[in-house]
Image: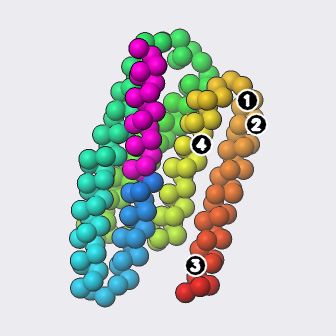
Amino acid sequence: MYLYLKSIHIIFVVSWMAGLFYIVRLFIYHTEAQEKPEQERRIISAQFEIMERKLMNIITTPAMLLTLLAGIAMVIVNPYWLSQGWLQVKLGFVVGLIVYHYICYRKMQQMRGGIYTWTSTQLRIWNEVATIFLFAIVFLAVLKNAVSWIYGLLGLVAFAIIVMSAVKIYKYYRMRNK
């Protein structure tokens, strides 16, 4: 039973993460569309609002809920895991990912209301936050206690710096090639 639950959990984690990655890409394009002429902006924004709503409500949020349900079921089947330090840290990152999901949901509602508070560059950086959560969660789930917490944390910080630097470099090249 545990391996079936684990398989379901992994499938819906993949779906949830795909939805989170794509929704923020839509936010980036939606924000950049605000620079277009009025008529074009209205048409494009209306289409992005439909895409964002359907992605969040039909794919991303249900995938999150099914991920959480499968994870809870795994712990019910094998409660021993809760005593493991790696799982407690992983659950902390999962809570962070749930908060990230909620912030994305709120951002979608703001944009639907015509409120664009983040630039496309800020949204690109925001998109990488999900990547950092994903790396932390997967490494903890796979390696468990095999890696020292200090090395794991240092690796995560180094990865975050590399990812954020890549976003800045991409912005530099985008601006230079305009």
**As shown in the figure, which amino acid type bears the numbered disc 4?**
Phe
Q: Nearer the viewer, mark 4 or mark 2?
A: 4
Q: Earlier in the sequence, mark 3 or mark 1?
A: 1
Discs 4, 3 touching: Cβ within 8 Å: no
Q: Earlier in the sequence, mark 4 or mark 3?
A: 4
Residue neighbourhood size for the residue with mark 2, other residues' Cα within 10 Å, grouped as few (<14), some (14–19), many (≥20): few
Left or right of residue 68: residue 44: left
Measure the alpha-carbon separation of dots 4 and 1: 14 Å
Measure the alpha-carbon separation of dots 4 and 2: 14 Å
Residue neighbourhood size for the residue with mark 4, other residues' Cα within 10 Å, grouped as few (<14), some (14–19), many (≥20): some
Measure the alpha-carbon separation of dots 4 and 3: 27 Å
What segment carries the magenta color? 1-20
Q: Which residue is mark 4?
A: 135
Q: Earlier in the sequence, mark 4 or mark 2?
A: 4
At 34% across and 32% down in the image, what residue appears?
Answer: 66
Q: Which residue is mark 2?
A: 151
